[in-house]
Amino acid sequence: MKHTILIGLGSNIGDRIEFLVSAIRGITDLETTVVDDVSNVYETEPVGNVPQNSFLNLCISVKTDMDHVTFHRKMKELEKFIGRTESVQWGPREIDIDILFFDSIVVASDTLTIPHREIVNRKFVLLPLSEIAMHYVHPVVGITIGELLKGVTDTHTIEHSDIFTSQLLTLINDSITNPIV
Ligand code: PH2
Ligand code: MG
Ligand code: MG
């Protein structure tokens, strides 16, 4: 498979693990696409000015033959299919599937920005991402995920969750090519 994509997943409404599992299964079901690495699951304090429940966040690594425009469209369709309803910017959501990096391309169009703009400011992205892509070099900033994590000033609480991680892995282990457990 030609391309490597790093993806951030988040949910803070309803059965959060079930929504995250549906996203991973949905990605695995796409043609020419595999999920080959999964981080731990973190329970994270919401970032933004909207009062809302805590999130579950994790990152995954995916390989695909699709180009970035097609893959992005598939992720939007998958969010809808899983049951994402409209929300305000930075508001609560059943499922959020964010393309963080696509190989090392840099794209800034009206509908799609790669790398994702907020990566460098968000510990809830950098910490799980560092587990699966510590040495990946951010193509715009020019330093690794590990270095970005060391320098991040985000003070929002983020807690590794053994329970949610093992629940998720149990439910998806048949869908990924490089299971952690
Ligand atoms: N996503 C947002 C806004 N705020 N906060 C946390 N902790 N985790 C998220 O995934 C998140 C957020 C909008 O995408
Ligand atoms: Mg997001
Ligand atoms: Mg999003």
Image (cartoon, helix red, strand yellow):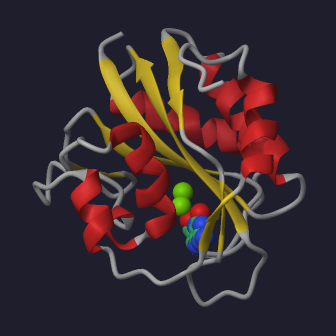
- Horizontal side of 93 relative to 77 (left or right) equals right
Image quarter of residue 171: top right
In the image shown, does 51 or 173 lie closer to the viewer?
Answer: 173
Is residue 108 visible to the viewer in this orientation of the structure? no
Which x, y percent locates residue 19? 79, 44
Which corner quadrant holds the C terminus? top right
Which x, y percent locates residue 99? 43, 45
Which x, y percent locates residue 15? 89, 52
- Horizontal side of 97 relative to 112 (left or right) equals right
- Horizontal side of 91 relative to 148 (left or right) equals right
Q: Residue at x 82, y 38 (%)?
A: 167
Q: Residue at x 38, y 14 (%)?
A: 65
Which x, y percent locates residue 60? 51, 37
Q: Is residue 174 above or below residue 119?
A: above
Which corner quadrant holds the N terminus? top left
Image quarter of residue 66: top left
Give the total of numbered labels. 0
In the image shown, does 178 or 6 lie closer to the viewer?
Answer: 178
In the image shown, does 20 or 154 lie closer to the viewer?
Answer: 154
| Residue lying furthest left | 142
Q: Is residue 143 above or below residue 83?
A: below
Q: Residue at x 71, y 55 (%)?
A: 161
Q: Residue at x 80, y 27 (%)?
A: 170
- Horizontal side of 49 relative to 6 (left or right) equals right
Q: Ligand 3 is located in which of the four quadrants?
A: bottom right
Is residue 77 visible to the viewer in this orientation of the structure? yes
Image quarter of residue 45: bottom right
